[in-house]
């Protein structure tokens, strides 16, 4: 889990703006201009009201209403025209912001997902999957609300406040001072109460991610919950997380709902105060101080009351948007954090290419699929050397730990020549799976080196390295799609015939043909409509269609019954021909025919040799095989 770090709202907001202009260099400026125009026009009615009242006030004394009517109609016509233009402008910016918002969310989701594909496995091992999913759902949704709703409204409100302030100062400094002092009180309330609300809204986002992570975990483990009758305990755990979410949400909304009534009544108080002060200034004929140089009159005081409503009301509306802004900033920061996660470091420059063997025995790179692979190794003079991919894997004094302070593999040295089968046995946690993870470079070693066809794997590009390896895990993952699609996942260029041949090799063809639609049967929910053994057979077929020179079988037959295991083993024997195979198995009967068996204990290789050699030694392997030693 990530530590709870405070939201850097300023930096996040600047980055969000920069992202918006980067993605929409034309639409954003147009939308901003339209928002500004609409806000400015919305501030002008007070000016026209003052002019109309001034016309009426002047003609009240002279009684010349015939002269006043054209002036009033002209002012009203100008105002109506501007309102019409503002309406068009508002329609334009609302439509543009809808396009911008959805476009932004689409691009951010793409960036997050693309970046996530390049993250090391360590990230997924140390973060709740439900919390990661929350970036794509809750965080994206809060950002949508902020960009589509809060951002345009806040900009419009800011321009309105600024425009009204300028108009107020133009007509009267004294009445403006009354409104500004009252507004400072409103700002004080907003900062105090809104700040507390913001804190709890940030906590709400984190609590929501925890709840989603817990729900996703329980969905995956629902069978385990029912088997052990942990429904009540699970409900209690969920209630605890849900109560924390409710508490954070309740406190956030309590502060938010308290703020608005306070601001509204403060605005009413300021309105009454302006009316009183304006009346006193009129009665006493006090000198007016303003940019306009106009004396106090009804034409100034009455519009000022309207400006008071507009000014304080806008500040109140700003406070309403604070909560959405805070939630949006929290969501944006979490999105940017995921986008900023360090990708896998890959400095490899050795690539895997298709080659064709020439008559003189040399290898020539070809642009088509030749089924003959070679490592393309750059030379110092700029040329390339081609090394045929054979599957020779060697560990030389390798040390490794998932965290620097704890080493789990100690001085591991081993080799597997092309076509050899090497098995790892030992207690859970001895380091068997860790060794195979190092071959894939899911994690990088601390000391020593691993050679693949004589090439240090640290110099091989990770994508090419993994393309040369086939792996069947104990936990099978099938994707939504047909059986054929899931087999072809191992080699997207494979034909239907190649996929069927791989299925036959793995012993999966017979059960596939008995499915309702054969190879076109749809699989959903990780192949829930198949048995565990059938799912494992498909995973083996997927590895077979990739046709790699090196295979890693991590407990590949652990979920298969004895009869099916015999079928699979036959297919695996055919698949292993000419390939290097690393096998991890607790069923020692499956590793008897291995060329070499490595017995691991607490990250050390304590025994190595063939089955017969290890039995003759009567050491740890002998104890494991005869049942004289229990795995601990």
Image: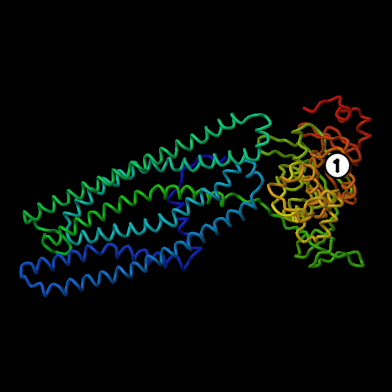
Residue 29 position within the rendered picture, expressed as x and y whole percent measured from the top left:
42, 66
187 vs 377, left or right, is left
Tell me the quarter of the image containing the N terminus.
top right
Secondary element at image label 1: helix
The answer to whether one can see residue 469 in this image is no
Tell me the quarter of the image containing the C terminus.
top right
Farthest front residue in view: 516
Q: Could you tell me which residue is drawn at 66 percent across and 32 percent down?
A: 226
Q: Could you tell me which residue is drawn at 86 percent across and 35 percent down?
A: 588
- Residue 240's place in the image compared with 274, above or below, is above
Residue occupied by mark 1: 564
Q: How many marks?
A: 1
- Residue 222's place in the image compared with 161, above or below, is above
28 vs 488, left or right, is left
* Quadrant in which residue 94 is drawn: bottom left
519 vs 114, left or right, is right
Residue 302 position within the rendered picture, expressed as x and y whole percent measured from the top left:
16, 58
Colour scheme of this structure image? rainbow
- Residue 319's place in the image compared with 424, above or below, is below
Residue 481 position within the rendered picture, expressed as x and y whole percent measured from the top left:
71, 54
Residue 110 position within the rendered picture, expressed as x and y whole percent measured from the top left:
58, 57
Q: Dot 1, crowdedness within 10 Å: few (<14), some or many (≥20)?
A: some
Farthest top residue in view: 628
């Amino acid at each position: 889990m990530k530590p709870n770090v405070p939201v850097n709202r300023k930096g996040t907001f600047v980055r969000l703006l920069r992202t918006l202009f980067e993605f929409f260099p034309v639409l954003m400026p147009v939308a901003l201009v339209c928002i500004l125009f609409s806000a400015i026009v919305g501030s002008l009615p007070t000016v026209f009201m003052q002019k109309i009242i001034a016309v009426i006030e002047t003609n009240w004394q002279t009684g010349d209403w015939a002269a006043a009517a054209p002036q009033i109609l002209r002012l009203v016509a100008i105002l109506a025209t501007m309102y019409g233009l503002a309406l068009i402008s508002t329609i334009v910016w609302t439509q543009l912001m809808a396009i911008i918002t959805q476009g932004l969310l689409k691009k951010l989701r793409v960036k997050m997902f693309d970046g996530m594909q390049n993250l090391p496995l360590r990230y997924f091992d140390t973060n709740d999957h439900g919390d990661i999913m929350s970036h794509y759902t809750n965080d994206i949704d809060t950002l949508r609300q902020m960009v589509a709703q809060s951002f345009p409204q806040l900009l419009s409100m800011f321009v309105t406040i600024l425009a009204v302030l300028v108009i107020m100062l133009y007509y009267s400094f004294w009445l403006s001072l009354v409104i500004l002092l009252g507004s400072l009180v409103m700002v004080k309330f907003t900062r105090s109460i809104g700040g507390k609300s913001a804190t709890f809204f940030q906590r709400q986002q984190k609590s929501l991610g925890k709840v989603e992570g817990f729900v996703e975990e329980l969905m995956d483990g629902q069978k385990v919950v029912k088997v052990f009758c942990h429904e009540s305990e699970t409900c209690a755990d969920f209630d605890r997380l849900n109560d924390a979410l409710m508490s954070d949400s309740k406190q956030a909304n309590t502060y938010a709902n308290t703020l608005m009534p306070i601001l509204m009544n403060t605005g009413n108080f300021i309105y009454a105060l302006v009316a009183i002060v304006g009346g006193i200034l009129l009665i006493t004929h006090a000198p007016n101080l303003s940019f306009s140089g106009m004396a106090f009159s009804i034409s100034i005081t009455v519009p000022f009351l309207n400006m008071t409503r507009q000014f304080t009301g806008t500040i109140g509306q700003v406070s309403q948007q604070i909560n959405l802004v805070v939630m949006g900033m929290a969501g944006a920061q979490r999105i940017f954090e995921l986008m900023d996660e360090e990708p896998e470091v890959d400095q490899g420059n050795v690539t895997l290419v298709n080659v064709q063997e020439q008559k003189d025995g040399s290898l020539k790179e070809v642009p088509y699929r030749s089924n003959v692979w070679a490592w393309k190794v750059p030379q110092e003079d700029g040329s390339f050397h081609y090394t045929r991919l054979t599957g020779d894997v060697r560990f030389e004094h390798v040390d490794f730990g998932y965290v620097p302070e704890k080493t789990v593999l100690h001085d591991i040295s081993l080799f597997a020549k092309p076509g050899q089968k090497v098995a790892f046995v030992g207690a859970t946690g001895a380091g068997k799976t860790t060794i195979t993870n190092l071959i894939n470079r899911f994690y990088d070693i601390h000391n020593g080196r691993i050679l693949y066809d004589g090439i240090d794997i640290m110099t091989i590009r990770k994508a090419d390295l993994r393309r040369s390896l086939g792996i069947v895990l104990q936990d099978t993952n099938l994707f939504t799609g047909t059986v054929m699609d899931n087999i072809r996942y191992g080699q997207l260029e494979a034909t239907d015939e190649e996929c069927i041949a791989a299925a036959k090799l793995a012993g999966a063809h017979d059960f596939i043909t008995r499915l309702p639609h054969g190879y076109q049967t749809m699989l959903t929910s990780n192949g829930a409509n198949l048995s565990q053994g059938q799912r494992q057979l498909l995973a083996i077929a997927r590895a077979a269609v990739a046709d790699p020179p090196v295979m890693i079988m991590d407990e590949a037959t652990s979920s298969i019954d004895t009869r099916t295991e015999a079928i699979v083993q036959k297919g695996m024997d055919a698949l292993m021909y000419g390939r290097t195979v690393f096998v991890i198995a607790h069923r020692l009967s499956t590793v008897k025919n291995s060329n070499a068996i490595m017995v691991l204990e607490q990250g050390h290789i304590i025994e190595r040799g063939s089955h017969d050699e290890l039995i003759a030694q009567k050491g740890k392997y002998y104890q494991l095989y005869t049942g004289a030693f229990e795995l601990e």
